[in-house]
Image: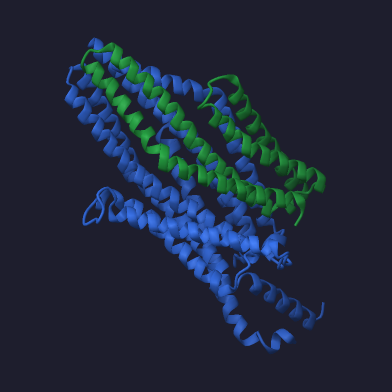
Chain colours: A blue, B green
Amino acid sequence: MSGSQVLTSVSSSRERELAGFAALGARRLFLLGGIALILTGMIFGDIFAVFTLHQNAARVGANLAAAAHAALAGNRQAVLSNFQNVGSFLENRGTKVDTHVHMIDFGYLALMLAILQPWVAFGESVKKKLAWAFLAGAWLLPVGVYLIHYVGLAHSPMKSIGWASIAADFGGLLVLIVTFVCLLGLWMHFRGKLASPPDMLLTDRSTEGRMLFAGGIALVFLGFLHGAYYAATDLYRHEAQDYSLLAQMSAGAAAGAGAVVDEALASYGQLQGAKAVNIAAHAHSIEFGLLAIMLAFFQPYVRLRASWKRRWAGVLLVGSLLLPVCVLLEMRFGLVAGGLADFAGLLIIFALLAMWIGILRYAGELDASVRPTSGSEAQR
Amino acid sequence: MSRSRRLLIVGGIALAVWGMSYGLWYAVFAEHQALDSIGGSLAGSFAAAADRNPAGMETSLEQYREAKYVYDRQVDVHGHWIGLAMLLIVLGIGFDRVNFSERFKVLLALGLLTGAVIFPLGVLLQTISHGPLPRAIAIAGSAFVIAALLGAATGVLACDS
């Protein structure tokens, strides 16, 4: 290939890339914002798991035990008061889990909308506004949900809904509206039978892209297999145990048998742990699989050396497999498996961060190179 | 756009809208009542134990069991419909990477879509009937999803090799 052919090939490829991934365009906003949401959600999840989750679970367990012992002592008021405390701790835990889950899920939704942007039949400026509105809502909802426990009903104009809830609901509404408008744009595109624009994301067959796509499907497959195995072997047994242990607790308390109550409480704690690790392993395997599949599409925009792109794809897949496996092993190996699961989470965070930086670098370089070459050089 | 991709993407979007609508209905009209019933009946059983009232204890625990059984399944159904819808859309976007004939890919897409619809439906039906039919529907649905995913993974690996 001659020098001019190379230059023409490079500039036409740049033009194609620009059409799908303009600097600070809607796709870039959705993509960078989406990965940032996932990263923040994961880091928040890690911090929450280390500093809040276990302490909160211990408090819930302690109040349940106190309720059982109050029943043992025949103190009805103390039973109800301890159950109120359990409700309060569960509400606190619920808002933290919701913050973590919504950030990550909105991140996934943003990545999906980024992939679909070329088919959304609106002008770039409208799509950019939609992307900003989506990101504003996607940040507002989890932050609002996090604050619900702390803000409560302070200065609220309503009787039962506080300012934090109002902010969270407004954020959710923004996300809903943008998603609906994007769906409308897709419908307009397909209804108008418009030609599909060329999109490098979907035609790329790089090694790292194939690794992530195949690895992602394998992770989703394993997650489903584990879910089916859990449903077939443990789910109904766990449900029956949940009921029988609570019955044992209350019957032991009514009969004044403290040892029976304590034994049931210990087994109940173990049961909740077993249920939690199985559900977490199933959900995380599928979620990380989906993430890997979606990231496979964006590999052409990760501006890193090919060898590093493959390494980060590998790191992401290793972390995505290791995390659910170690979570599953937590019941048997305790803190060692828990520590390894945290390490796997860090691997995923580092790999995501590297890809995010790669995408940022790529866009910046493109912007710089476009200005002087967009006119005469592209024609040449 | 090929038929298999269209099937996955359009089916996925429809399922996502359905799953979200179901979740919205559930959150507005059923979830708070279910949570109140779970918490209230559990506290009631312990309070009955404190009163040394075995009959009240048993009734409350039975209410707790039924409310928890239904709640767990309704939340699962909502989560699985939306999660599977997302999987359908994402796989649909990249379905060109599956290196099989279009006819076989349509079969895979049909299997995935069918499984994604009937697996949560079977779980939902368990809240109405505790008989074997809803379980059989849920098992069949999950088998469809697992088999179709295995097929898709094989197709991608075939492409890679």
| Residue at the image point whose x is 72% and y is 61% from the top | A203
Residues B111 and B63: in front is: B63
Is residue A318 something one can see in this rendering? no
Residues A209 and A123: in front is: A123
Is residue B153 something one can see in this rendering? yes
Residue A53 position within the rendered picture, expressed as x and y whole percent measured from the top left: 34, 41
Quadrant of image for the C terminus of chain A: bottom right
The quadrant where residue A225 appears:
top right
Left or right relative to B76: residue A371: right
| Residue at the image point whose x is 65% and y is 73% from the top | A19
Residue A304 position within the rendered picture, expressed as x and y whole percent measured from the top left: 59, 66
Residues A352 and A181: in front is: A181
Seen in the picture, residue B121 relative to B84 is either above or below; the reply is above
Seen in the picture, residue B81 relative to B51 is either above or below; the reply is below
The quadrant where residue A20 appears:
bottom right
Residue A28 position within the rendered picture, expressed as x and y whole percent measured from the top left: 55, 68
Left or right relative to B131: residue B54: left
